[in-house]
Image (spheres, grey):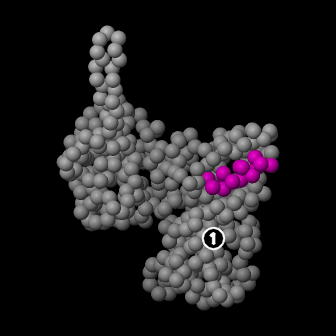
């Protein structure tokens, strides 16, 4: 390839693989067929609303972003789907003001004379909205918008809202919309293990909410992400290399995109259009070097020790490799096998139990969270994105080899 061609292809790779931002294009969205169908079915059912929930980094926002192209308004003019993010300072009114500000209003002034052109002025619905915003106000506006349109406000990071009053107002709004504005569907998106964490004490609204849990992605879905991306670039990938990326990703599409981006660019730089294992190995080093500062800091804080013979790096790596349940939790016994493999000799729980306890303390992050009772504790990474980072650190520093990586039982990666 000529230099200009290589540069152009490498730049295109940055548009195909999107590790830093949620997917926005239907063409590069892969997997999540069941979840996508559940959401779209709910939108087409009268009186139903949607709650998309799951771990951080599993692709909830990307799913919400690509809904609109999949929707075919039946007898409606078009889809109005404003997508906003909540923050810790938001209340009921500020959220709806954000939503209405994304809805354009076109005011057309008739032309003067025979040859004059009509003048169009574009504002937003939010600009003309004065006074208090209550569930009744939202209902009135939604009813007007939904006469000729599908109105689908998407409220992301719903878990960041504080206070029972806010969630109660949303409960009242959802109930009212379900009964009186069937062409409106609110889509709530939030980080949570269970529905109760997002709508605690408001279970009465559950009948109107289709609950769509986003688990970590399957191996097949992760492989498809890479394959689709490379196909868009006119490139291919060895099956072994694609499987390596899927294993490293641990069900989190952020890492699939990150490794797909770096490995494809390494192949391009070497005048190759097939991504190989050696390119993925190079991508690991680039991924570590360019990782979020929060991840680098968390790893450093969790593993630093004045003693040169400390085992914090090995113990944390063993936690990252431990078999976990569907919510990411593992027991101390699940750490024994990967710890023994890392240390190349048998290790019993007593040899690393203190490390597990330390990882749950503020002095080391905490990087793990713990549930259950003594002797029956279960642990998981507080930030799911740290887990693949720890594994890549282990590979980069020779603590494990690619052949040592095992499949985790909760998503088959």
Is 165 included in the stretch rendered in magenta?
no
The image shows a total of numbered marks equal to: 1
Residue at (32% x, 65% y) in the render: 162
Can you name the residue that lies furthest to the top here? 114
Q: Quadrant of residue 300?
A: bottom right
Task: Please say whether residue 210 is visible from this viewpoint.
Answer: no
Q: Which residue is mark 1?
A: 390
Is 262 included in the stretch rendered in magenta?
yes
Residue at (70% x, 88% y) in the render: 309
Using the image, determine if residue 226 lies above or below residue 350: above
Q: Quadrant of the C terminus?
A: bottom right
Residue at (53% x, 52% y) in the render: 21
Expressed as whole percent of the image width and height from the top left, the position of residue 377 reads 49, 82
**Image position of 151 (left or right of 223):** left
Q: Quadrant of residue 160?
A: bottom left
Using the image, determine if residue 70 lies above or below residue 379: above
Expressed as whole percent of the image width and height from the top left, the position of residue 70 reads 46, 38
Instruction: Give the residues drawn in magenta, as a range.
Output: 257-270
**Image position of 113 (left or right of 329):** left
Q: Main secondary structure of the magenta part?
A: helix
The residue lying toward the viewer, choosing from 345 and 301, is 301
Secondary structure state at the residue bearing disc 1: helix
Residue at (37% x, 52% y) in the render: 155
Expressed as whole percent of the image width and height from the top left, the position of residue 52 reads 41, 55
């Amino acid at each position: 390839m000529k230099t200009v061609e290589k540069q152009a292809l490498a730049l295109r790779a940055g548009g195909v693989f999107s590790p830093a931002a949620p997917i926005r294009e239907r063409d590069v969205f892969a997997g999540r067929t069941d979840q996508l169908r559940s959401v779209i079915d709910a939108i087409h059912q009268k009186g139903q609303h949607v709650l998309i929930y799951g771990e951080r980094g599993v692709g909830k926002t990307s799913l919400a972003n690509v809904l609109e192209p999949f929707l075919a308004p039946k007898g409606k003019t078009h889809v109005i789907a404003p997508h906003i993010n909540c923050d810790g300072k938001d209340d009921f009114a500020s959220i709806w003001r954000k939503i209405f500000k994304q809805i354009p209003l076109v005011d057309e002034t008739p032309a003067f004379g025979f040859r004059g052109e009509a003048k169009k002025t574009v504002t937003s619905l939010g600009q003309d909205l004065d006074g208090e915003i209550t569930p009744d106000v939202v209902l009135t506006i939604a009813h007007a918008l939904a006469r000729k349109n599908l109105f689908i406000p998407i409220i992301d990071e719903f878990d960041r809202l504080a206070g029972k009053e806010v969630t109660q107002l949303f409960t009242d709004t959802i109930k009212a919309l379900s009964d009186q504005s069937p062409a409106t569907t609110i889509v709530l998106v939030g980080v949570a293990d269970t529905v109760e964490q997002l709508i605690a004490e408001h279970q009465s609204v559950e009948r109107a909410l289709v609950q769509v849990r986003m688990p970590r992605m399957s191996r097949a879905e992760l492989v498809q992400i890479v394959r689709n991306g490379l196909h868009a670039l006119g490139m291919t990938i060895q099956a072994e290399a694609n499987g390596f990326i899927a294993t490293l990703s641990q069900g989190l599409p952020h890492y699939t995109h990150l490794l797909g981006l770096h490995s494809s660019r390494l192949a391009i730089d070497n005048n190759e259009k097939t991504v190989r294992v050696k390119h993925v190995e190079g991508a690991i080093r680039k991924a570590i070097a360019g990782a979020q500062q929060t991840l680098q800091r968390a790893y450093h804080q969790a593993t630093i020790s004045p003693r040169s013979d400390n085992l914090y790096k090995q113990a944390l790596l063993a936690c990252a490799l431990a078999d976990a349940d569907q919510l990411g939790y593992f027991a101390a016994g699940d750490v024994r096998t990967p710890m023994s493999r890392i240390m190349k000799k048998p290790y019993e729980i007593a040899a690393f139990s203190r490390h597990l306890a330390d990882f749950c303390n503020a002095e080391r992050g905490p990087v793990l969270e713990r549930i259950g009772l003594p002797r029956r504790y279960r642990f998981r990474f507080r930030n799911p994105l740290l887990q693949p980072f720890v594994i890549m650190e282990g590979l980069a520093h020779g603590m494990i080899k690619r052949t040592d990586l095992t499949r985790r039982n909760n998503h088959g990666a």
